[in-house]
Image (spheres, rainbow, N blue to C red):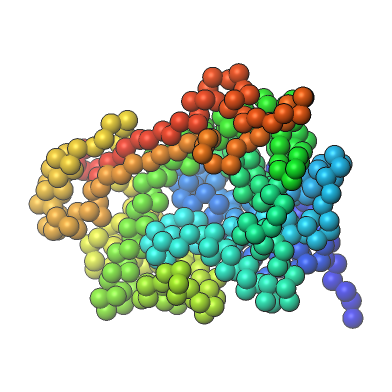
Amino acid sequence: MTEINKLKIFNDPIYGFITIPNALIYDLIQHPYFQRLRRISQMGLSYLVYPGANHTRFHHALGCMHIMQKAVETLRFKGVTISTDEENALYIAILLHDIGHGPFSHAMEKSIVEDVHHEAISLLFMNQLNVEFEGKLSLAIQVFKEDYPRKFMLQLISSQLDMDRMDYLKRDSFYSGVAEGNVNSERLIQMMNVVDDVLVIEEKGIYSVEKFLMSRRLMYWQVYLHKTSLVAEIILTKILKRAKILTQNGIVLPCSEPLLFFMKNKIIFETFNSKNLELFSQLDDFDIISALKSWQNHDDYILSTLSKMIINRDLLKIKVSNEKISKDELQLLKERFSLENNITIPETNYFIFKGKIKTQAYSKEAEPIRILRKDKSIEDIVDVSDQLNLKSLSRLVTKYYICFPKQLV
Protein backbone atom coordinates (compact mmCIF):
# COMPACT_ATOMS: atom_id res chain seq x y z
CA MET A 1 0.00 0.00 0.00
CA THR A 2 1.51 3.34 -1.05
CA GLU A 3 1.79 6.13 1.50
CA ILE A 4 0.37 9.51 0.44
CA ASN A 5 2.96 12.27 0.36
CA LYS A 6 1.46 14.89 2.68
CA LEU A 7 4.29 17.43 2.45
CA LYS A 8 2.84 19.11 -0.61
CA ILE A 9 3.41 22.62 -1.98
CA PHE A 10 0.95 25.19 -3.33
CA ASN A 11 1.86 27.72 -5.99
CA ASP A 12 0.52 31.06 -4.75
CA PRO A 13 0.50 34.21 -6.94
CA ILE A 14 1.45 36.38 -3.94
CA TYR A 15 4.25 34.46 -2.21
CA GLY A 16 5.30 31.83 -4.72
CA PHE A 17 5.56 28.33 -3.25
CA ILE A 18 3.73 27.63 0.04
CA THR A 19 4.81 24.46 1.83
CA ILE A 20 2.64 22.33 4.10
CA PRO A 21 4.76 21.90 7.25
CA ASN A 22 3.48 18.50 8.46
CA ALA A 23 0.95 15.71 7.95
CA LEU A 24 -1.57 17.10 10.50
CA ILE A 25 -1.80 20.41 8.62
CA TYR A 26 -2.25 18.47 5.38
CA ASP A 27 -5.11 16.47 6.88
CA LEU A 28 -6.80 19.64 8.17
CA ILE A 29 -6.53 21.27 4.72
CA GLN A 30 -8.00 18.12 3.15
CA HIS A 31 -10.96 18.08 5.55
CA PRO A 32 -14.34 18.99 3.94
CA TYR A 33 -14.78 21.84 6.44
CA PHE A 34 -11.63 23.50 5.12
CA GLN A 35 -12.14 22.58 1.45
CA ARG A 36 -15.47 24.44 1.67
CA LEU A 37 -13.45 27.68 1.90
CA ARG A 38 -12.66 27.25 -1.81
CA ARG A 39 -16.33 28.14 -2.35
CA ILE A 40 -16.46 31.19 -0.05
CA SER A 41 -15.34 34.46 -1.66
CA GLN A 42 -12.80 36.44 0.34
CA MET A 43 -14.25 39.84 -0.55
CA GLY A 44 -17.96 39.07 -0.68
CA LEU A 45 -19.61 40.90 -3.57
CA SER A 46 -16.64 43.20 -4.27
CA TYR A 47 -16.19 41.46 -7.64
CA LEU A 48 -19.18 43.55 -8.79
CA VAL A 49 -16.80 46.54 -8.51
CA TYR A 50 -13.38 44.92 -9.01
CA PRO A 51 -13.80 42.07 -11.55
CA GLY A 52 -10.57 40.37 -10.48
CA ALA A 53 -11.62 40.07 -6.83
CA ASN A 54 -12.75 36.45 -7.15
CA HIS A 55 -10.24 34.92 -4.74
CA THR A 56 -11.45 32.80 -1.84
CA ARG A 57 -11.05 32.28 1.90
CA PHE A 58 -9.04 29.17 0.98
CA HIS A 59 -6.36 31.33 -0.70
CA HIS A 60 -6.29 33.67 2.29
CA ALA A 61 -6.01 30.93 4.94
CA LEU A 62 -3.05 29.30 3.17
CA GLY A 63 -1.38 32.71 2.77
CA CYS A 64 -1.77 33.41 6.49
CA MET A 65 -0.23 30.05 7.36
CA HIS A 66 2.70 30.78 5.03
CA ILE A 67 3.58 34.11 6.60
CA MET A 68 3.10 32.61 10.07
CA GLN A 69 5.85 30.13 9.10
CA LYS A 70 8.06 33.11 8.20
CA ALA A 71 7.25 34.81 11.52
CA VAL A 72 8.15 31.71 13.55
CA GLU A 73 11.42 31.36 11.60
CA THR A 74 12.31 35.03 12.22
CA LEU A 75 11.48 34.97 15.95
CA ARG A 76 13.46 31.76 16.51
CA PHE A 77 16.43 33.29 14.70
CA LYS A 78 16.26 36.19 17.19
CA GLY A 79 16.35 33.81 20.15
CA VAL A 80 12.64 33.54 20.97
CA THR A 81 11.88 30.05 22.29
CA ILE A 82 8.94 28.49 20.46
CA SER A 83 8.37 24.77 21.04
CA THR A 84 7.26 22.41 18.27
CA ASP A 85 3.80 22.17 19.89
CA GLU A 86 3.50 25.97 20.08
CA GLU A 87 4.64 26.30 16.47
CA ASN A 88 2.00 23.81 15.36
CA ALA A 89 -0.67 25.57 17.44
CA LEU A 90 0.13 28.84 15.65
CA TYR A 91 -0.18 27.21 12.22
CA ILE A 92 -3.47 25.51 13.10
CA ALA A 93 -5.03 28.59 14.71
CA ILE A 94 -4.18 30.91 11.80
CA LEU A 95 -5.16 28.29 9.21
CA LEU A 96 -8.61 27.88 10.79
CA HIS A 97 -9.23 31.44 11.99
CA ASP A 98 -11.75 32.14 9.18
CA ILE A 99 -13.28 28.67 8.82
CA GLY A 100 -16.58 29.92 10.30
CA HIS A 101 -17.34 32.36 7.48
CA GLY A 102 -20.64 31.82 5.71
CA PRO A 103 -21.47 32.49 2.04
CA PHE A 104 -20.09 35.81 0.75
CA SER A 105 -18.20 36.13 4.02
CA HIS A 106 -20.23 38.62 6.10
CA ALA A 107 -23.78 38.70 4.67
CA MET A 108 -24.88 35.56 6.56
CA GLU A 109 -24.05 37.04 9.97
CA LYS A 110 -26.78 39.64 9.56
CA SER A 111 -29.50 37.51 8.01
CA ILE A 112 -29.59 33.71 8.07
CA VAL A 113 -27.89 33.05 11.42
CA GLU A 114 -28.99 35.61 14.00
CA ASP A 115 -26.01 37.76 14.98
CA VAL A 116 -23.61 34.84 15.37
CA HIS A 117 -20.14 36.17 14.58
CA HIS A 118 -17.97 34.11 12.23
CA GLU A 119 -15.26 33.83 14.92
CA ALA A 120 -17.72 32.05 17.22
CA ILE A 121 -18.56 29.60 14.41
CA SER A 122 -14.83 29.16 13.69
CA LEU A 123 -14.38 28.07 17.31
CA LEU A 124 -17.27 25.58 16.99
CA PHE A 125 -15.60 24.10 13.88
CA MET A 126 -12.24 23.92 15.69
CA ASN A 127 -13.82 22.12 18.66
CA GLN A 128 -15.48 19.62 16.31
CA LEU A 129 -12.21 19.04 14.44
CA ASN A 130 -10.43 18.59 17.77
CA VAL A 131 -12.76 15.68 18.54
CA GLU A 132 -12.10 14.13 15.12
CA PHE A 133 -8.33 14.64 15.43
CA GLU A 134 -8.19 13.22 18.99
CA GLY A 135 -7.24 16.42 20.83
CA LYS A 136 -4.42 17.54 18.52
CA LEU A 137 -5.98 21.02 18.19
CA SER A 138 -6.28 21.67 21.95
CA LEU A 139 -3.33 24.06 22.22
CA ALA A 140 -4.39 25.95 19.07
CA ILE A 141 -7.87 26.41 20.57
CA GLN A 142 -6.31 27.67 23.83
CA VAL A 143 -4.34 30.29 21.89
CA PHE A 144 -7.37 31.24 19.76
CA LYS A 145 -9.49 31.73 22.91
CA GLU A 146 -6.80 33.87 24.60
CA ASP A 147 -6.33 31.20 27.28
CA TYR A 148 -2.61 30.69 26.68
CA PRO A 149 -0.16 32.73 28.80
CA ARG A 150 2.25 33.64 25.96
CA LYS A 151 0.61 36.82 24.70
CA PHE A 152 2.65 37.21 21.51
CA MET A 153 1.12 34.02 20.13
CA LEU A 154 -2.37 35.51 20.16
CA GLN A 155 -0.99 38.80 18.79
CA LEU A 156 0.36 36.94 15.75
CA ILE A 157 -3.17 35.60 15.12
CA SER A 158 -5.36 38.51 16.17
CA SER A 159 -4.11 42.06 16.78
CA GLN A 160 -3.62 45.35 14.94
CA LEU A 161 -0.57 43.90 13.18
CA ASP A 162 -1.34 40.20 12.75
CA MET A 163 -0.79 37.64 10.00
CA ASP A 164 -4.47 37.88 9.02
CA ARG A 165 -4.30 41.60 8.20
CA MET A 166 -0.91 41.31 6.54
CA ASP A 167 -2.20 38.67 4.14
CA TYR A 168 -5.62 40.10 3.34
CA LEU A 169 -4.27 43.58 2.59
CA LYS A 170 -1.60 42.24 0.27
CA ARG A 171 -3.90 39.63 -1.32
CA ASP A 172 -6.96 41.86 -1.72
CA SER A 173 -4.78 44.61 -3.17
CA PHE A 174 -3.36 42.14 -5.73
CA TYR A 175 -6.70 40.67 -6.83
CA SER A 176 -8.63 43.94 -6.86
CA GLY A 177 -5.81 45.77 -8.66
CA VAL A 178 -5.79 48.54 -6.02
CA ALA A 179 -2.04 49.06 -5.64
CA GLU A 180 -2.38 51.35 -2.60
CA GLY A 181 -3.08 48.34 -0.38
CA ASN A 182 0.14 46.48 -1.15
CA VAL A 183 2.03 46.10 2.13
CA ASN A 184 5.58 44.84 2.61
CA SER A 185 4.75 41.86 4.84
CA GLU A 186 8.28 40.42 4.52
CA ARG A 187 9.86 43.57 5.92
CA LEU A 188 7.30 43.78 8.75
CA ILE A 189 7.95 40.16 9.75
CA GLN A 190 11.73 40.71 9.67
CA MET A 191 11.27 43.61 12.12
CA MET A 192 9.29 41.53 14.64
CA ASN A 193 10.64 40.54 18.02
CA VAL A 194 9.31 39.42 21.40
CA VAL A 195 10.01 41.11 24.76
CA ASP A 196 8.51 39.55 27.93
CA ASP A 197 6.27 37.37 25.75
CA VAL A 198 4.79 40.46 24.04
CA LEU A 199 5.16 41.15 20.31
CA VAL A 200 7.15 44.28 19.37
CA ILE A 201 8.43 45.86 16.18
CA GLU A 202 12.04 47.03 16.15
CA GLU A 203 12.47 50.80 15.75
CA LYS A 204 13.91 50.56 12.24
CA GLY A 205 10.56 49.07 11.14
CA ILE A 206 8.57 52.23 11.99
CA TYR A 207 8.16 53.34 8.37
CA SER A 208 6.92 49.90 7.34
CA VAL A 209 4.28 50.04 10.10
CA GLU A 210 3.24 53.54 8.98
CA LYS A 211 2.87 52.29 5.40
CA PHE A 212 0.87 49.28 6.65
CA LEU A 213 -1.62 51.48 8.57
CA MET A 214 -1.96 53.93 5.68
CA SER A 215 -2.57 51.04 3.27
CA ARG A 216 -5.26 49.69 5.58
CA ARG A 217 -7.04 53.04 5.63
CA LEU A 218 -6.93 53.33 1.84
CA MET A 219 -8.17 49.77 1.33
CA TYR A 220 -11.13 50.33 3.65
CA TRP A 221 -12.38 53.47 1.94
CA GLN A 222 -11.43 52.45 -1.58
CA VAL A 223 -12.32 48.74 -1.53
CA TYR A 224 -13.98 47.22 1.57
CA LEU A 225 -16.36 50.16 2.10
CA HIS A 226 -16.69 51.05 -1.58
CA LYS A 227 -20.26 52.28 -1.94
CA THR A 228 -21.20 49.76 -4.65
CA SER A 229 -19.85 46.80 -2.64
CA LEU A 230 -21.65 48.18 0.40
CA VAL A 231 -25.06 48.48 -1.27
CA ALA A 232 -24.70 45.03 -2.91
CA GLU A 233 -24.02 43.37 0.45
CA ILE A 234 -26.97 45.18 2.08
CA ILE A 235 -29.27 44.11 -0.77
CA LEU A 236 -28.11 40.49 -0.34
CA THR A 237 -28.80 40.71 3.40
CA LYS A 238 -32.30 42.06 2.71
CA ILE A 239 -32.98 39.29 0.15
CA LEU A 240 -32.09 36.62 2.70
CA LYS A 241 -34.22 38.27 5.39
CA ARG A 242 -37.17 38.50 2.98
CA ALA A 243 -36.73 34.86 1.96
CA LYS A 244 -36.66 33.88 5.63
CA ILE A 245 -39.94 35.75 6.34
CA LEU A 246 -41.65 34.17 3.33
CA THR A 247 -40.43 30.68 4.26
CA GLN A 248 -41.58 31.04 7.85
CA ASN A 249 -44.99 32.15 6.53
CA GLY A 250 -45.31 28.84 4.71
CA ILE A 251 -44.25 29.92 1.22
CA VAL A 252 -41.99 27.30 -0.37
CA LEU A 253 -38.91 28.82 -2.03
CA PRO A 254 -36.59 26.77 -4.28
CA CYS A 255 -33.16 26.46 -2.65
CA SER A 256 -30.70 23.90 -1.27
CA GLU A 257 -31.61 21.86 1.83
CA PRO A 258 -28.99 23.50 4.10
CA LEU A 259 -30.16 27.00 3.11
CA LEU A 260 -33.80 26.00 3.59
CA PHE A 261 -33.00 24.74 7.11
CA PHE A 262 -31.48 28.07 8.17
CA MET A 263 -34.39 29.99 6.66
CA LYS A 264 -36.98 27.84 8.44
CA ASN A 265 -35.28 27.98 11.84
CA LYS A 266 -34.07 30.81 14.04
CA ILE A 267 -30.51 29.82 14.86
CA ILE A 268 -28.66 31.73 17.59
CA PHE A 269 -25.33 30.86 19.21
CA GLU A 270 -26.97 29.03 22.12
CA THR A 271 -28.81 26.66 19.73
CA PHE A 272 -25.88 26.16 17.34
CA ASN A 273 -25.40 22.42 17.94
CA SER A 274 -23.33 19.86 16.02
CA LYS A 275 -26.22 19.08 13.64
CA ASN A 276 -26.57 22.78 12.77
CA LEU A 277 -22.80 23.03 12.34
CA GLU A 278 -22.82 20.15 9.86
CA LEU A 279 -25.58 21.85 7.84
CA PHE A 280 -23.73 25.18 8.01
CA SER A 281 -20.61 23.44 6.65
CA GLN A 282 -22.60 22.57 3.51
CA LEU A 283 -23.44 26.23 2.78
CA ASP A 284 -21.34 28.25 0.34
CA ASP A 285 -21.62 31.01 -2.27
CA PHE A 286 -23.14 28.62 -4.81
CA ASP A 287 -26.20 27.97 -2.61
CA ILE A 288 -26.91 31.70 -2.56
CA ILE A 289 -26.31 32.41 -6.26
CA SER A 290 -28.39 29.39 -7.25
CA ALA A 291 -31.23 30.58 -5.00
CA LEU A 292 -31.07 34.13 -6.38
CA LYS A 293 -31.33 32.81 -9.95
CA SER A 294 -34.55 31.01 -8.99
CA TRP A 295 -35.96 33.78 -6.80
CA GLN A 296 -35.63 36.46 -9.51
CA ASN A 297 -38.67 34.86 -11.17
CA HIS A 298 -40.73 34.52 -7.97
CA ASP A 299 -44.23 36.04 -7.57
CA ASP A 300 -43.12 38.07 -4.54
CA TYR A 301 -42.30 41.55 -5.91
CA ILE A 302 -39.71 42.33 -3.22
CA LEU A 303 -37.82 39.03 -3.47
CA SER A 304 -37.75 38.95 -7.26
CA THR A 305 -36.81 42.62 -7.71
CA LEU A 306 -33.94 42.48 -5.21
CA SER A 307 -32.66 39.15 -6.60
CA LYS A 308 -32.55 40.60 -10.12
CA MET A 309 -30.49 43.53 -8.78
CA ILE A 310 -27.66 41.20 -7.70
CA ILE A 311 -27.85 38.79 -10.65
CA ASN A 312 -27.86 41.61 -13.23
CA ARG A 313 -25.74 44.06 -11.23
CA ASP A 314 -28.46 46.68 -11.47
CA LEU A 315 -28.27 47.90 -7.90
CA LEU A 316 -29.91 50.58 -5.81
CA LYS A 317 -28.52 54.10 -6.00
CA ILE A 318 -26.33 54.93 -3.00
CA LYS A 319 -25.20 58.36 -1.88
CA VAL A 320 -22.51 58.74 0.79
CA SER A 321 -22.19 61.95 2.80
CA ASN A 322 -20.33 63.37 5.78
CA GLU A 323 -23.67 64.71 7.05
CA LYS A 324 -26.53 62.74 8.59
CA ILE A 325 -29.44 61.91 6.29
CA SER A 326 -32.72 63.55 7.34
CA LYS A 327 -35.79 61.40 8.10
CA ASP A 328 -37.93 63.75 6.00
CA GLU A 329 -35.83 63.07 2.88
CA LEU A 330 -36.19 59.35 3.47
CA GLN A 331 -39.95 59.56 4.08
CA LEU A 332 -40.59 61.50 0.88
CA LEU A 333 -38.77 58.87 -1.18
CA LYS A 334 -40.70 56.06 0.53
CA GLU A 335 -44.08 57.68 -0.10
CA ARG A 336 -43.30 58.23 -3.76
CA PHE A 337 -41.98 54.67 -4.30
CA SER A 338 -44.94 53.19 -2.44
CA LEU A 339 -47.37 55.03 -4.71
CA GLU A 340 -45.54 54.19 -7.95
CA ASN A 341 -45.15 50.46 -7.20
CA ASN A 342 -48.30 49.73 -5.20
CA ILE A 343 -46.48 48.49 -2.08
CA THR A 344 -46.90 49.47 1.58
CA ILE A 345 -44.65 51.96 3.37
CA PRO A 346 -43.12 49.19 5.57
CA GLU A 347 -42.30 47.23 2.39
CA THR A 348 -40.40 50.22 0.98
CA ASN A 349 -37.81 49.61 3.75
CA TYR A 350 -36.35 46.90 1.51
CA PHE A 351 -35.59 49.49 -1.17
CA ILE A 352 -35.12 52.79 0.65
CA PHE A 353 -33.01 53.03 3.78
CA LYS A 354 -30.16 54.89 5.41
CA GLY A 355 -27.23 53.92 7.57
CA LYS A 356 -23.68 54.76 8.52
CA ILE A 357 -20.24 53.31 7.98
CA LYS A 358 -17.26 53.87 10.20
CA THR A 359 -13.68 52.80 10.27
CA GLN A 360 -10.51 53.43 12.20
CA ALA A 361 -7.16 52.45 10.75
CA TYR A 362 -5.57 52.27 14.21
CA SER A 363 -7.22 52.17 17.62
CA LYS A 364 -5.54 53.64 20.68
CA GLU A 365 -7.98 51.68 22.88
CA ALA A 366 -7.15 48.25 21.40
CA GLU A 367 -3.94 46.27 21.86
CA PRO A 368 -1.24 48.72 20.63
CA ILE A 369 1.45 48.16 18.04
CA ARG A 370 4.53 48.39 20.24
CA ILE A 371 7.82 49.81 18.99
CA LEU A 372 11.05 48.59 20.57
CA ARG A 373 13.43 51.57 20.78
CA LYS A 374 17.19 51.21 20.48
CA ASP A 375 17.44 52.01 24.23
CA LYS A 376 15.14 48.98 24.88
CA SER A 377 12.16 51.15 25.88
CA ILE A 378 8.79 50.24 24.35
CA GLU A 379 6.26 52.79 23.06
CA ASP A 380 2.99 52.91 21.10
CA ILE A 381 3.55 53.50 17.35
CA VAL A 382 1.44 56.68 17.48
CA ASP A 383 3.71 58.20 20.15
CA VAL A 384 6.91 57.26 18.33
CA SER A 385 5.96 58.19 14.77
CA ASP A 386 6.72 61.64 13.39
CA GLN A 387 4.05 61.07 10.76
CA LEU A 388 1.19 63.47 11.59
CA ASN A 389 -1.18 61.42 9.45
CA LEU A 390 -0.77 58.52 11.88
CA LYS A 391 -2.43 60.47 14.70
CA SER A 392 -5.37 61.23 12.44
CA LEU A 393 -5.56 57.53 11.49
CA SER A 394 -6.44 56.71 15.09
CA ARG A 395 -9.55 58.92 14.83
CA LEU A 396 -12.84 57.15 14.18
CA VAL A 397 -14.23 58.32 10.82
CA THR A 398 -18.00 58.07 10.26
CA LYS A 399 -19.88 58.57 7.00
CA TYR A 400 -23.60 58.36 6.28
CA TYR A 401 -25.39 56.81 3.33
CA ILE A 402 -28.83 56.65 1.79
CA CYS A 403 -29.97 53.98 -0.69
CA PHE A 404 -32.97 54.18 -3.03
CA PRO A 405 -34.11 52.92 -6.48
CA LYS A 406 -32.53 54.67 -9.44
CA GLN A 407 -35.89 55.71 -10.90
CA LEU A 408 -36.32 58.08 -7.94
CA VAL A 409 -33.29 60.15 -8.93
Q: Is residue 72 above or below residue 121?
A: above
Q: Is residue 369 left or right of residue 247?
A: right
Q: Quadrant of the N terminus?
A: bottom right
As displayed, is residue 232 above or below residue 215?
below
Vertical comparison of 44 with 332: above or below: below
Q: Is residue 177 visible?
A: no
The residue that appears at 60% across and 37% down in the rendered structure is: 368
Q: Residue at x 34, y 41 (%)?
A: 356
Query: 133 or 283: which is nearer to us?
Result: 133
Q: Residue furthest left?
A: 339
State the image quarter where residue 260 is shown: bottom left
Residue 325: x and y, percent? 24, 37
Where's residue 210, x and y in %?
Answer: 62, 27
**Numbered circles on residues, count:** 0
Residue in the picture at 71% in, 43% down: 198
Position of the C terminus by quadrant: top left
Left or right: residue 241 compared with residue 289: left
The reply to whether residue 191 is visible in this rendering is yes
Residue 111 position within the rendered picture, expressed as x and y whole percent measured from the top left: 38, 62
Could you tell me residue 321's position as x and y percent?
A: 31, 32
The residue depicted at 72 percent of the width and 64 percent of the height is: 139
